[in-house]
Amino acid sequence: MPELPEVETIRKQLEKALIGKKIKSAEIRLSKLVKGISAREFENKIRGALIKSIKRRAKILIVGLSNPVRWQIGNFSLVIHLKLTGQLIYQEKYDPKQITKYTHIIYYFSDGSTLFHNDLRRFGYVKLIPAEKTDKLLEEKEKFGPEPLEKQFTLEKFKKILSKRQGAKIKPLLMDQTFIAGIGNVYSDEILFYASVRPMRIATSLKPAEIQKIYQGIKKILPEAIRLHGSSVDTYIDIKGKQGKYISRLKVYGRDNKLCLKCKTKIERVKINGRSAHFCPRCQI
DNA sequence: TATATTGTTACACC
DNA sequence: TGGTGTAACAATAT
């Protein structure tokens, strides 16, 4: 499931592969993946557009497009959410053998390369928004909390937003996109293990040292995961079809009933607000 | 066949 | 009003 490190990995790779390319056509094989407009309108609006930029906000990819001025329809951004099982697969040369029943959109570029949007569970989506609305999506306050890897996200800032959400349990809070952007089930577990804090702890109960440790965990684990191209749990692979190597570094996620790597105690799995959480009952207080 | 899976959101509740 | 929790939803694997 793509969280911030996985989406950022894809973003960087797309940037390298696609900037400057022209979309020759798009083939929508599953129209429900396209939100807001019909598949036909979607195809018409992106055909002939140039790929200008690839940005990320939280777990969302934003592909900046530019249309020839003479079209007079203005520019659009392509907004992509992969949700649980979405994949973007880049091919230097189109190979129809790579098409599966999970291939829902195919983008054809004028140099012969292609991008497949696959999604086993079909939870993801793509939509087009006018270019002038892109900045608003990227802005803070609108919908998402701060980007954890930006310099502006300081310990002071973390303390400040925490103080506004005193009653919440820390794990659901870390996963709340309006609180902080990009963290999901895997990395919230890993960050809290790093901080030796149990996922069900209430925000107000956290001591200053614990808050600092959680902050450090965010700043350490996310970049480390990006460096290793994310974690391949479920179906995640990068645009070259490769798995993320951070999966071998996971300390608690998916390790229930296995022994804690630090103290050999059995890792537990519990439900917190309907979501599974993994933790070491000895290391995490 | 029932259940588990997660990110997001609509909605109930205090 | 807004913070919090719950349920529902998407579709599939087991």
Image (cartoon, coloured by chain):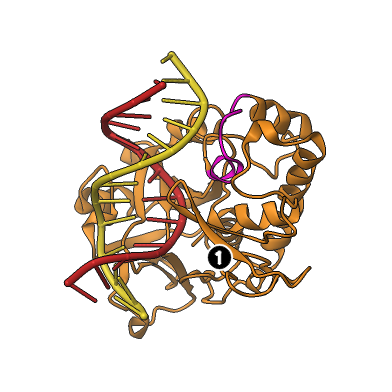
Chain colours: A orange, B red, C yellow
Left or right: residue A115 compared with residue A250: left
What chain is tagged by disc 1?
A
Q: Position of residue A97 (x, y in %)?
A: 34, 85
- In terms of secondary structure, where does tag 1 sit? helix
Measured as percent of width and height from the top left, residue A88 is found at 45, 66
Q: Is residue A242 above or below residue A22?
A: below
Within 10 Å of disc 1 (Cα), the crowding (few <14, some 14-19, many 20+) is some
Along the line of sight, the residue nearer the viewer: A196 or A183: A196
- Residue A268 lies left or right of residue A65; in this view the side is right
Q: x, y percentage for residue A10?
A: 55, 61
Q: Nearer the viewer, residue A156 or A112?
A: A156
User: Which residue lies under the disc numbered 1?
Assistant: A17
Question: Is residue A108 in view from this perspective?
Answer: yes
Q: Is residue A259 magenta?
A: no
Residue type at mark 1: give it. Ala
Q: Residue at x 27, y 76 (%)?
A: A101
Image coordinates for residue A178, horizontal then vertical, percent? 52, 34
User: In this picture, which residue range is highlighted in magenta?
Assistant: A164-175
